Amino acid sequence: MLSERRLQVLRAIVQDYVGTEEPVGSKALTERHNLGVSPATVRNDMAALEDEGFIAQPHTSAGRIPTDKGYRLFVDKLAGVKPMSGPERRAIQNFLDGAVDLDDVVARTVRLLAQLTRQVAVVQYPSLTRSTVRHVELLALAPARLMLVLITDTGRVEQRMVDCPAPFGEASLADLRARLNSTVAGRRFSDVPRLVEDLPDAFDVEDRGTVSTVLSTLLETLVEENEERLVIGGTANLTRFGHDFPLTIRPVLEALEEHVVLLKLLGEAGDSGMTVRIGHENAYEGLNSTSVVSVGYGSGGEAVAKLGVVGPTRMDYPGTMGAVRAVARYVGQILAES
Amino acid sequence: MLSERRLQVLRAIVQDYVGTEEPVGSKALTERHNLGVSPATVRNDMAALEDEGFIAQPHTSAGRIPTDKGYRLFVDKLAGVKPMSGPERRAIQNFLDGAVDLDDVVARTVRLLAQLTRQVAVVQYPSLTRSTVRHVELLALAPARLMLVLITDTGRVEQRMVDCPAPFGEASLADLRARLNSTVAGRRFSDVPRLVEDLPDAFDVEDRGTVSTVLSTLLETLVEENEERLVIGGTANLTRFGHDFPLTIRPVLEALEEHVVLLKLLGEAGDSGMTVRIGHENAYEGLNSTSVVSVGYGSGGEAVAKLGVVGPTRMDYPGTMGAVRAVARYVGQILAES
DNA sequence: ACCTGGCACTCTGTCCGTCCGAGTGCCAGC
DNA sequence: GCTGGCACTCGGACGGACAGAGTGCCAGGT
């Protein structure tokens, strides 16, 4: 196991490298951090850290830079999450409070995250599958043609046409509407299939066909996950990426356009708590030189979607994690209120 | 006025520069294009072209590169629009034909444009203001609460709640629905206000309040232009921009995120025919080193929105214009069919 | 056992001088 | 009005010298 001081050396290396973007040597380290030992000692520690694969030197006789493994250790053991300052928190809240609807909330969130972290921000629209039903409306367009409108707790509205196998009376319609709402309102989407299972039994035989049709349309709407939209912002921050431009930035831009890839990435991240994927830990090759910090957010304690940032592995992890967590928290509040 | 040969020299310079991305000199010109004159003559012509501001030399004793003014002349007088080849046309059609709904059409269009031109593609969602009404549906949610659903010819669906000042009978509702549809179905949004003006007069006094409320909600929906969404793709192509990276690319990425700016830009472009804005002709500063090629597209002959590409001023204008025009044409067809 | 100072070594980045080639402008001649 | 020739100017490439940073290792001190 690494001694306490070696861990401190690693921490110092990560911090300096993130700040200066240049390989850091033993002398500079002892000058900027009071480790209480001489450069020579630090050199020995660095050699050990290099043996273990936590740091590497780009060329002989250059300083060291952290490896993905080094960042991993830093994030897991050496760095906490830097909480936002009071003014920052207020600014976040003010900015998000101005939102007028769901689209606006998402748009503002993306901007905010990008600005706070000075990196690329990714926000997933609240997904249907995990949210809850606020209201179901059922309307007769014609004797045998209904319109089903579903309103979610996050403010999304989905609509479907339903062609009934048989004409459906006004009384039956009102009945179904009332029963539906009392059964599913406030429930999670995932629970709905179970809850409505027995509903047709309460109706006359001639109406059951229609009721079943309506219900299956409703279930279809619920699972329609292809609506998983994603909004991205702050791509201009990619220009601060590193020195060797086109090569680094291109695959990242490509990855960002592949929403499917990003959704998968976010999906793989842990459901609760914050997830940090560093460099090669990202399955997608184009993002091998980036780190992704993501976290779920939602209206209650329940996460309904994810948001996060994509940046160079050389990023300020504590600060980024703090910003991501804070934003997720406030977005959750906003969604709960509306 | 410039002689015919000088124009040819300019054309040759533009073509070579676009191809090689390097300043082009007199000797290279005579070798690659058979102008029938010697380098010395070309030099004189180039000096004249430089005096007129069509070309410039980055440094003394380097070749010449076209200025914005030079490209302008090239586009206006010297180059046509390069039509797509047969296979290309078929590929476009195949690719777009696979689309399942409006979102998909737009998404595919963006990808397609970006691939064809190897530049950044911008597609505006069919805007409400210029499209036509396919159908208006009016539903009673409660005695004094209606839902208004508007379906456009481009497949968009908009919905609004309407709180009536007074209860509204089923018969009146059916009447209003029928009258509304016969009045506005198939009409352009911009004509609707005029068309529905006299509609309340046909109803009983007690219903007029509600009818007016419904109509004003409808008109609100029509003018709600903030829905002007924009989709962007192919940003990875920015990496092929030029040599001096971060500085050139950053403002462009920033501009691309400012959808408002882009919408304005597209809006300013001429309504009919293709518009090419070169370099400083773009009002927005961040796009001063880019050219924007845009064109309207729509379901009939009528343009309902715009699409285009953003690329370096040093772009293949004939090819780009050809691709943009072809894509716009096919998207129009698809929209008309659906 | 561990830290430290010293020393030799190895790179990289930079500066500078040189050189070559491409390109130009101009001029005299056809 | 075109052409060939000529002198001139730069920018980019090449190469050597140099300084600086950083390393590894070792012998000595606590």
Image: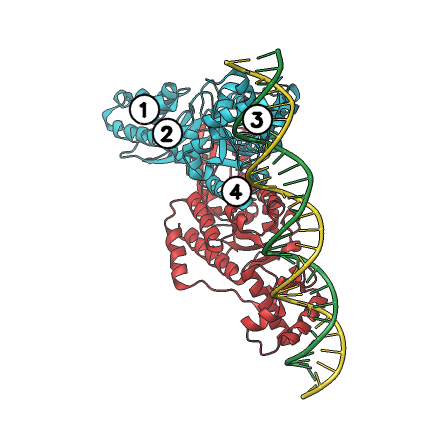
Chain colours: A cyan, B red, C yellow, D green
User: Gap between marks 4 and 2, in whole Å?
Assistant: 37 Å
Front: mark 4 or 3: 3
Front: mark 3 or 2: 3
In the rendered view, would you say B204 is above or below A197?
below
Residue A321 seen by the camera: no
Among numbered discs 1 and 2, the one appearing first in the sequence: 1
Chain label for disc 4 = A
Among numbered discs 4 and 3, the one appearing first in the sequence: 3
Residue denoted by label 2: A222
Kindly identify the residue that appears in the image at 29 percent across and 31 percent down: A213
Among numbered discs 1 and 3, the one appearing first in the sequence: 3
Place residue B270 in its image quadrant. Answer: bottom right
Residue denoted by label 3: A13
Kindly identify the residue that appears in the image at 48 percent across and 30 percent down: A68
Q: Which disc number belongs to residue A249?
A: 4
Task: Please provide percent x and percent y for residue A30.
Answer: 63, 23
On the same chain, marks 1 and 3? The answer is yes
Left/right placement of residue B212 relative to residue A296 reads right
Residue type at mark 2 is Leu
